[in-house]
Image: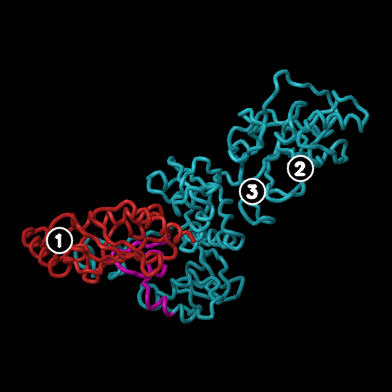
Amino acid sequence: MDDDMHVFVKFNSSTVPISVNSSSTVHDIRKEISKTNNIKTGEVRIIFAGKELHDHQKLKDMDIQNHTVVHAFRGRHLEPRTPLHLQKVSTNASDQSDKSSVPTYFVLCRRVCGAVKPGKLRIRCVGCREDKIIVTKEPQQWSDILQKGVIQGVCHTQGCRGPQPEFYFKCRGHEGQDHDHVVPLPLVRNNFLKVSCMTCLDDDSNPILVFPCPSNHAMCVSCFESYCLHQLNSRQFVEHESAGYTLSCPGYDADCRSAFVLDVHHFGIMGRENYERYKQFGAEECLLKMGGVLCPGTNCGMGIFLDDATEQTNHVECSECGLHFCVLCKEEYHGEETCSNMLLQGEAANSRLLSHYAVNMSLSKYDTESASTIRKTTKPCPQCGTPIEKSGGCMHMECPLARCQFSWCWICGTEWTPDCQDNHWFG
Amino acid sequence: MAATRRLNKELQDIKKQGLEFIADIAAKEDNILQWKLIIRPLMPPFNNGAFKIELSFPTEYPFKPPILTFQTPIYHPNVDEKGQVCLPIINAANWKPATKTEQVLQALVALIHEPEPEHPLRSELAKEYLEERSKFMKNATEHTTKHASG
């Protein structure tokens, strides 16, 4: 910590910088405020991060650094009889600022650092949006701060008295402005125990992402990014009723499969562009699951819900690009003739099903060739129609799409039966 | 890259561990994604054989499983003529990123020792294994001597 630094004190709607040093205490700030405002020291109260501060507390122990903003107001200050150890006050008496073994929160700083960074928890009043609120109870767990209304507080902004605190996070990676808030990542933690990453096997990664399974399987942040990207590209994210489009722990245990990442902000670790893709894929999967279709028009991909009339005629006009297409074959609308894909066979069947994923196809100039290669090398899953390539092994196929997983026979193109096993399991 | 870091560590660990049924394990020509090794089964009818195996890891490893092929022919119901083997642990549907290559090799040796005739890739061998065990043992021993002695 610099010896010469400034703390900003908000008092009576003005903000004044106060010079402090590494050994300054809260008492020094109170004295300074009382001097400049000509009031008694006993009438100055200081609030920081949802807590009232007391004289004996050193600023550095309270995580008050250069340019940190604290709030002061006039009121009777009562020093507690036994010194309070609020916050993460050093438990072993050593005054050395050895922070390497102190747990930290981690945040995703998208705008400035573009990375996972240590973060700091701050509290403000929902009513006046000022940090001049004292909480009545300390948060015990993540849900206390992520759910509104669990923790109450008393706001000391004049005329506010709002009882509702709001918790937010700031990034420690850069010097931020007042309203420079970042998203917390509750699953990312310090790796004090030298747990090895289940993916790259390194045991000195820090921080690590800990999955919510009973075994607390962990991955380093860069492996988690690769894991998410791989699962995203192969459409292996699954729909979870409360969390949405998400992943579970890839560990062995039966419990791992139901240990989902419930806070999807963690997927922001993939970076802005892939996070946008993630959101788009999630929306597409949701739409398909609800019986909608994606417009097969080049570079369109508009999501469309079918109305009763469409159910009859299979004719859809895309409101975005104006393409008239057939719901069954996803080709240009062909009139009243029976659609060639009713029987789900042959080349046409493949092309129909390809267009489930026709979004942004024009991005590739090899589009036509790709489509024809896919037609040649794949067969459609009999249930969802996704083109599937058989890269080896037996004839028993399982659709790799997370929302389908249909078990079928490569030869018959229908559901896998004991007959398939008896007659042509391996060709 | 996660694959390189991890495979270097895995290869080191396997060499250090010195599994008795594995010999000459190495990455090919400084390509850590391609391994070759020799399996020496401990139980008859394959215990006099040395079987060359290739392991090919995708760049997406360990999010995708490795592909394992026999370079030496083996008389086994679960390995086809091309050297492909149906090993559930590296099946895409069962694959877990936490599965280590050592476990894959353990599973492979277990399958060599105890064929699974109910999931065959060569049904005629499965039939022979189930119905005429002594004939199977004799054929497999001869086949091993002819193709895999070393």
Q: Is residue A171 above or below residue A87?
A: below
The colour of chain A is cyan
Task: Indicate the position of residue A267 as horizontal and vertical percent values.
Answer: 56, 54
Disc 2 designates what residue? A2
Q: Which residue is mark 3?
A: A183
The alpha-carbon separation of the residues under discs 1 and 2 comes to 73 Å
| Of marks 3 and 2, the one in the foreground | 2
The letter of the red chain is B
Element type at mark 3: strand
Q: In the rendered image of this protein, does residue A16 appear above or below residue A52? A: below
Q: Which residue reaches farthest top?
A: A81
Residue A9: assigned label: none
Q: Amino acid at mark 3?
A: Val
Neighbours of disc 3 within 10 Å: few (<14), some (14-19), many (20+): some
Is residue B64 visible to the viewer in this orientation of the structure?
Answer: yes
Q: Position of residue B34 (x, y in %)?
A: 37, 67
- Snapshot quadrant of residue A200: bottom left
Please tell me if label 3 and label 2 are on a single chain: yes
Q: What is the distance, in whole Å, between disc 3 and disc 2 at their CAs?
A: 28 Å
Residue A226 location in percent, x, y? 50, 58
The stretch in magenta equals: A372-401
Q: Residues within 10 Å of mark 1 (few under 14, many from 20)?
A: some
